[in-house]
Amino acid sequence: MDLERPDPAEFAGPADPADLADRSEQPEPPEQPDRLDHVALCVRAQGHAVAGRYAEAVADFDRVLADDPDHAWALGFRADALRQAGRYSEAVAGFEQTLALTPDDPWVLRQRGYTHRSADDSRRALADLDQVLESSPADRDTLGERAKLLKQLGRDADSIAAFDDVIRRHPLFSWAYAERGDAHRVAGRLDAAVADFDRCVELSPGDSYALLNRGICYQLLGRDRRALADFTRAVRLRPGVDAMWVRRAEALIALGRLRAAVADLDQALSLNPDRAWTLQRRGEAHSRLGDLTQALADLRRAHELAPGDGEVAAELAEVRRRIAEQQQATATPDESWTLSHRGERHREAGEFAEAIADFDRALDLRPGYMWVLRQRGEARRQADDFEGAIADFSEVLPFAEDDAWLWGSRGQAYAAAGRHRAALADFDRALELSPGTVWLLQDRANSRYQLGDWRGVLEDTAPLVEADSLDGPHRVQRAHSHLSLGEHDAALAAFQRTAELFSELGSAYGGSGEVYRLLGRYDQAVADFDRALELWPSYPFGLGSRAQVHQALGRHDEAIADLRTATEIAPGIRWLQRVLGENLRAAGRLDEALEAFDQPIGDGTSASAQFRYERALTLLARGDTAAAAEAFADVAESYSALLADQGDAADPDHVWGLIKTRLAQGDAEGGRALVERLTALERNAAFGVAVRLDLRALRSSAPAVDSAIVSELADRFGSPEPGPG
């Protein structure tokens, strides 16, 4: 397995030369920019780059360069942002433009060297670093990077000598000790390697790769308990790196802790499911536990991934031999065992009904068979029998209270059944047992998202974003959490970053379109919704939100077309039906609007009150004043009851619902009496957009409404009337 130490920018350890050059020894601009906005834009762009928002950084530098094409500061740091984004050829071109303006600048040469190194052009990288050293022969970062390049070129003796020189000049440079230690490790000088890693960890206790490589040295020296301690620290620092989990599992196997090793290998495979080395190790652990069916599956897959690996082939042959011996030795195997293993094969093949039937028969023969209960619980969960899965997992848990997988699996079943508070309790327990496990953090974040705990979502997903192990759909949930908190800039950046990483994920573009819609930037909103629907034509949220942009711009026929499609795809989404009715009413198609608002949605809920308000407003627009008055009275009663139940913790949507109902009833003073209550409540951009559209509809459908209070409410609570851009 490749254990090459990555750039320190990728982990919480000591800085490597590239990182230090990026952050601490950046050059002063060759001359003070003429205009203050250049400085502000460059500083903001560098902040974007440090936060990993490279597209935003490049955009800000481009604005400076559009005004001043020879702005060396912007050119150089723009190129460095491109380097960090992995756009190496563009970065090299940018550094060359910068060098044309500031010849022989050491920082620019060094950064170009790092770019060549990242692009696997070690020869050019070495030439750039040598040129820097001509003017700055004692520069620590350049010396260290040059020593690392020599190691990559296979010049081991030269590399170690170069690291010796760096450490002699800079004895507190922890990164150099780690790199020299790795060179000693590869050369088999394990005691020297351990000494270097000891010094690195002493200087930088959070260097996970120094801990990992020191643990490997201890393994090779037969000191497995010391290795386990180092690997455990490394896992805690970098839970998103599969190698950390695999190495700890190897130490656990050596110490005979096979179940714990399997749990670690499960985690590693959740991060990287196609690594033959990990599958081989898990197969070995299952084999030693006597779980030959699991061992066979793992080793077969490892052999498929690495057909030329003789060690895997030998282990696979040995497991097959042992299975054959068992089959020969047991002419009439225990029927419950046969049924349970056949059920497992059915489950793995997606044949859940057949699997459950076999597990049921096995449990009839051997009641309380824990392994079969676990397997049946998993089959039931996969077959969408969530309550059955919960029952099975609950029966096993008293006998396996330290099994993180089991707690997490029951949590998944609770979540799938919509019981998210119970799911949270199980995910909390699982994460106590297995901190940092990616799938558990993602599933807990999902339950928090469903419960509206936006801060909790951000808390759970933050380490996964940092480790770059968060999948696309959960990144979208994270971005929506920012949006729900009113953090529009953070939401937009998160949606755009997700679209960069997962360019075929329509919901990422739909999310950024929604931010633009709430900000009134309609051209950009429509462009993003169009892209989302190009990728996902049956995306009801994208269709509905694009329709709301058309609605805001008065393009009701286009809105109706989108909403008709959306409600055909997802007839149960109530807000789509409501917005369809609003647009039909605005287009003068009042009978169709009433039909839309008459769709069954339940009684007594906030959604029901909203629908009944819109229906009453449509009756008023049609001239049915008596029916409208009766309907508005019913709506006012519903909103009043909701607010009485909520007390001081009133929902601003419900307060606004009662205000607009009072206005539609001609009771301007009754509406005004609620204004201060609404003012005291927290509101977001979506609320302002809704108020603006509600007041527009009220003016159109109830022309006798008090115009003075409508204007006052628009000024206080509504978002501004934007143009199309």
Image (cartoon, grey):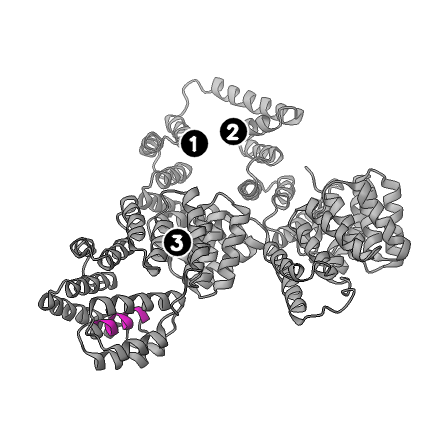
Task: Find the magenta span and give its range.
Answer: 652-661
Find disc 3 in the rendering and name its residue.
Answer: 423
Question: What amino acid is at disc 1?
Answer: Glu
Quadrant where the C terminus sits is bottom left
Question: What amino acid is at disc 2?
Answer: Ala
- Residue 530 in percent (x, y) is at 42, 48
Dominant secondary-structure state across the stretch colored magenta:
helix
Nearer-the-camera pick, 326 or 196: 196
Where 644 falls versus 267 (above or below)?
A: below
Quadrant where the N terminus sits is top right
Question: Is there CB contact under 8 Å for labels 1 and 2?
Answer: yes
- Residue 167 in percent (x, y) is at 86, 55
Quarter of the view holding residue 27:
bottom right
Where 316 falls versus 703 (above or below)?
A: above
Is 395 on the left-hand or right-hand side of 314? Answer: left
Q: Earlier in the sequence, mark 3 or mark 2?
A: 2
Find disc 1 in the rendering and name its residue.
Answer: 348
SS at circle 3: helix
